[in-house]
Image (cartoon, rainbow, N blue to C red):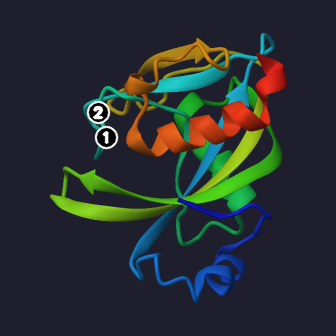
Amino acid sequence: MVLFSNEVKNMKELEKIIKDNDLVSKEYEVAVIVYAFDKENKIIFQRRGLGCRDEQLKLETIGGRVKKNDIDFRTALQREITEEVGTDANIEIEDFIISTYAKTYDTRYNKEQSWIYLVYKGNLESGQLKIAEPDKCLGYERYKIGEVDENELSNGAKELYRIVSEKYSYLK
């Protein structure tokens, strides 16, 4: 479900926007996601490993949970990029795309988890992607818009992929 399309900078701004939204659980986590495009305009996906708490073996983009000590969302996303792909790759964060809300099933704790996703567009400017978290990432796959089998995407990634595909259809 789409929440909003204007960028918010931090948790305080986010809480202000969603405070009256009865559809969003009061117990949610926030994730920052980058749809990173390479020089051939292919989206970089990760194949989720068995160490992930949900949707193992599915394709997902780069990103992850915002931590309490993250100053703002762009800083959190830069931290996540570095944690997941290492320091050799330079992924430049560009535009804020959209915020969505979804629920997943956390197999580690056997419970449903509510997520607010903050999605950005980025570009792989230089360097090589490393598998910095081998238990969570089996490898990287790259697809042009329209080439990926949507059944291979995680549930959270499906809605986002459709939004990104429509917005950036000129990159096909």
Question: Where's residue 50, x and y in %?
Answer: 25, 31
Disc on res. 52: 1
Neighbor class of circle 1 (other Cα within 10 Å; few <14, some 14-19, many 20+) is some
Q: Quadrant of residue 122?
A: top right
Q: Indicate the amino acid at tag 1.
A: Cys
Q: CA distance from mark 1 to mark 2?
A: 6 Å
* Residue 73 is at least partly visible in this image: yes
- Tell me the element at label 2: loop
Q: Residues within 10 Å of mark 2 (few under 14, many from 20)?
A: some
Please state the horizontal and vertical placement of residue 3, each as a whole percent of the image: 62, 66
* Comparing labels 1 and 2, the label whose residue is closer to the camera: 2
Residue 82 visible, this angle: no
Toward the left, the furthest residue is 110
Quadrant of the image occupied by residue 145: top right
Q: Secondary structure at mark 1?
A: loop
Tag 1 near tag 2, CB within 8 Å: yes
Q: Which mark is residue 56?
A: 2
Q: Is residue 132 above or below residue 118?
A: above
Q: Position of residue 44 (x, y in %)?
A: 61, 23
